[in-house]
Image: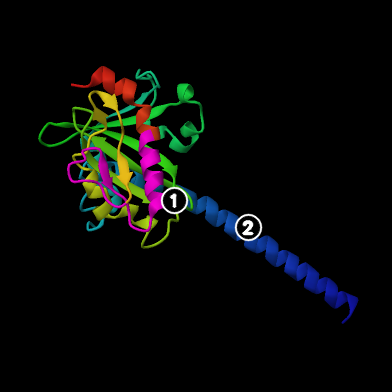
Amino acid sequence: MSKQSNLYIFLYASAMVVIVATILSVAAIFLKPFQQKNLEIEKKQDILRSVKLATKANEVNDKNSYVEKEFAKYVVEQLVIDSKGEIKSGMSAFDIKLKEELAKPLGERNLPLYICKLDDGSLKYVIPVRGKGLWGPIWGNIAFNEDMNTIYGAVFSHKGETPGLGADIDKAFFQDPFVGKQILENQKFVSITVVKGGAAPTDIHGVDAISGGTITSKGVEDMIKDCLNAYVPYFSKNRK
């Protein structure tokens, strides 16, 4: 093969690399707003699901519009509070990146809190939570009744837990038992225990762990305790 042929191949390959890289860069820039919008809709939907709303999101023709309307209708306040339970002005809960906040010392964290008003006039307080599972991050939202003690609803998700085991934290059979559980005992914060082998029916602070998913279940327990503990001062000041 001649030197000219080698040069041609080199230049052709280099040109193709540049062209492909350019196309990918343009595509990434073009798709970024759509990807960002999808993440926003997913976040809003999960908040609504914790208060048993947006139940038809996967059935309607325009999911984005449906979720946006439900969120605007039912989420009446998006607060940011500090570790002392004080509301921080000029900030919106939806703008808070929980992963970044949890990396800070507790005293420096901005804590998001959503207040929803349902059709019956009752208020629900939604707290986003985030932690670590077996293989990666886990997260969710926990909604409380106006007593700021009793759980009204809970949703959890994950990035890469084991299918059929830890991944089942996003299933109703794991989430539904959280409803009605309480995080206080004699006005003291005790959180929720995820019990390996099953919680006793009378345990107002315990739910069943996932069989075979012990580490992820423990991750959910730790996530709930670590995240909710930061809200205790706010709840103590505002509990009815």
Label 1 vs label 2: CA separation? 19 Å
Q: Position of residue 240 (x, y in %)?
A: 18, 21
Q: Which residues are the magenta region?
A: 197-225
- Mark 1 surroundings: few (<14), some (14-19) or many (≥20) residues within 10 A: few
In the picture, residue 109 is in which quadrant? Answer: top left
The amino acid sitting under disc 1 is: Gln
The image's colour scheme reads rainbow
Most distant residue in the bottom direction: 1
To which residue does mark 1 refer?
35
The amino acid sitting under disc 2 is: Thr
Query: Within the magenta stretch, is there residue 74?
Result: no
Judging depth in this view, the residue of 183 and 117 nearest the camera is 183
In the picture, residue 111 is in which quadrant? Answer: top left
- Mark 2 surroundings: few (<14), some (14-19) or many (≥20) residues within 10 A: few
Residue in the picture at 34% in, 19% down: 85
In the picture, residue 6 is in which quadrant? Answer: bottom right
Q: Where is residue 34 in the image (x, y as percent from the top left)?
A: 43, 51
Q: Can residue 208 be seen in this view?
A: yes
Circle 1 — which element? Answer: helix
Residue in the picture at 84% in, 71% down: 7
Residue in the picture at 18% in, 46% down: 201
Circle 2 — which element? Answer: helix
Task: Judge depth for marks 1 and 2 and give the one in front.
Answer: 1
Most distant residue in the right direction: 3
Judging depth in this view, the residue of 114 and 25 nearest the camera is 114
Q: Can residue 69 be seen in this view?
A: no
To which residue does mark 2 refer?
22
Disc 1, disc 2: CB below 8 Å? no
- Looking at the rendered image, the quarter that the N terminus falls into is bottom right
